[in-house]
Amino acid sequence: MKSADGTVNLVGELIEFKDDAYIIRTALGELRVAASRVRCEGDSCPTFETAGANVRITGADTLGAGVMPLLMSGYAGYLDAEASITNTQEAGQILASLVADGGFGDDIGTFLVSSTSSTDGFEALLNKEAAIAMASRRITPAEARSLKGAGAGNMVSPDQEYIIAVDGLVVIVNPENKLASIGVQDLARIFSGEYSNWSQLGGEDLPITLVSTPADSDTNAVLNARIFGDAPPARPIGTVTVDDDTAVAAAVNQEPGAIGLVGFAFERGARPVKLVNECGIAVEPDTFSAKTEEYGLQRRLYLYTTEAADDMTRDFLEFAQSEAADGVIAKAGFVDLGVERRPQTIDSSRATSLLNSQVDAFEGNVIREFLAQMIKFDRLSTTFRFRLGSSSLDERARLDMERLTKYLEAMPEGTNVALVGFTDDVGAFVSNQKLSQERAKSVADELMAYAGDRLAGISFTSSGYGEIAPSACNGTEAGRGINRRVEVWIEKDAI
């Protein structure tokens, strides 16, 4: 029996595993050791899948290794308890034991977390081997149908599907590199090896040094999903492979020609670079753009359960999706779902792009009306989007409604809030403008109905501007989905 910090090293005969504790015979006699305190090594060690954990969690290692240890500690703090977290004898597996009253009270329960893959998580739910599945993608229709057929319920209902964070990446270069922005296509050329010198991007005659985490890392999974699709290229010769995002940033800081991808929390002095999409829209690499889901290199992170989940499972899931978990999610290097606020100015990239656009007189009037309104308001990160081919809000809307309501409850009475609608560019301009107005009003009505008297002192208006001010390219369904949105603006004087 060995503890994680090496301070305990017991050798003996395992007599029994009972009540989450090992009973072993040693030279000192029989000893009872809590399983949460040590790791068992040897042929007679029990496997923890059958060791009686109260809640089993299986799935994406992005969450299992990157978030769950901190989330368990945060959950314990939320309960005024103490979490003891240890590795089991299984690779990628941890056991968290929670004890009430800061570690001096009764046992609350144990959580067994197995870091594998999103697909494994859903299979574990299907086979009733886990209570919670961790996923770095949304459940597929086929997976949802299989689980529903097995009696697990509606896997995309709000009480079974929990969005807890956004996983976003930022392109970083050495601080001496003057590169301010990079196109998605140029980024693909670097990561495929087509570009090997900064002069090919208009920079110095300096070799490009690509620094990356291992090919099977979550960082590269996001890159492949957003840039290369199902056919990622082989790594360029000379790629420097390091263990994690911290090491990527350290290597980029040391090498003048280096470039890498890291989570938003891991820039560590390197220069972040704006990402420019295929149609020339530049997006700042920050948490605000990730929360609005307008940044190109990101994905939602999910937890799933079945309709038969017990109270302990549901309590943990509610915590993981609540504001109380935001701090530990950010500490883990991911983007929480809290509401952020950003000024809107006439010299912003969005305003500049609109001022320079070539449009007819009618569209020009709509743009001028939009800019006149925009500069009176700040924008909140809350952005409502719709299900594909539907006027219904998507799966994140319920969570956003509650968080936005809590945010606005703290605003002074009489604060003005505008719901502002936009569309893609499919169809006639006038029809799109009307559609955006209808959707903005629909979201405003739904928000007021949801909040009830909680927002009685807030004044709401709605408006729509059609296809102007796109956030993404309209050339793909994914881009059009991002552009079909309702933004939330708040008057500048509201504090």
Image (cartoon, helix red, strand yellow):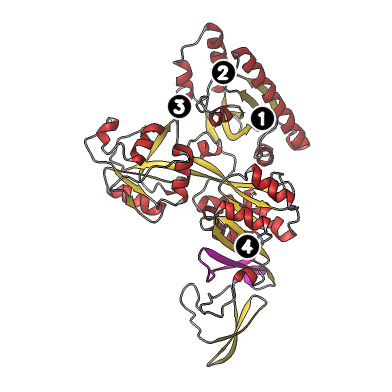
Check the image and name the residue furthest to the top: 361
Q: Is residue 320 magenta?
A: no
Question: Of the residues tagged 3 and 1, which is closer to the observer?
Answer: 3
Give the percent coordinates (x, y) of residue 464.
63, 20
Q: Which residue is mark 1?
A: 415
Q: Which residue is mark 2?
A: 370
Which label's residue is closer to the chain start, 3 or 1?
A: 3
Secondary structure beneath label 2? helix
Dot 1 and dot 4 residues touching (CB under 8 Å): no
Question: Of the residues tagged 1 and 4, which is closer to the observer?
Answer: 4
C-alpha distance separating marks 2 and 4: 47 Å
Q: Which residue is mark 4?
A: 76
Which residue appears at 44% of the width and 41% of the height?
231
Residue type, label 2? Phe
C-alpha distance separating marks 2 and 1: 20 Å
How many residues crowd around disc 4 within 10 Å: few (fewer than 14), some, or many (20 or more)? many
Quadrant assignment for the C terminus = top right
Question: Of the residues tagged 3 and 4, which is closer to the observer?
Answer: 3
Residue type, label 4? Ala
Residue type, label 3? Ile
How many residues crowd around disc 2 within 10 Å: few (fewer than 14), some, or many (20 or more)? some
Which residue appears at 60% of the width and 55% of the height?
121
Secondary structure beneath label 1? loop
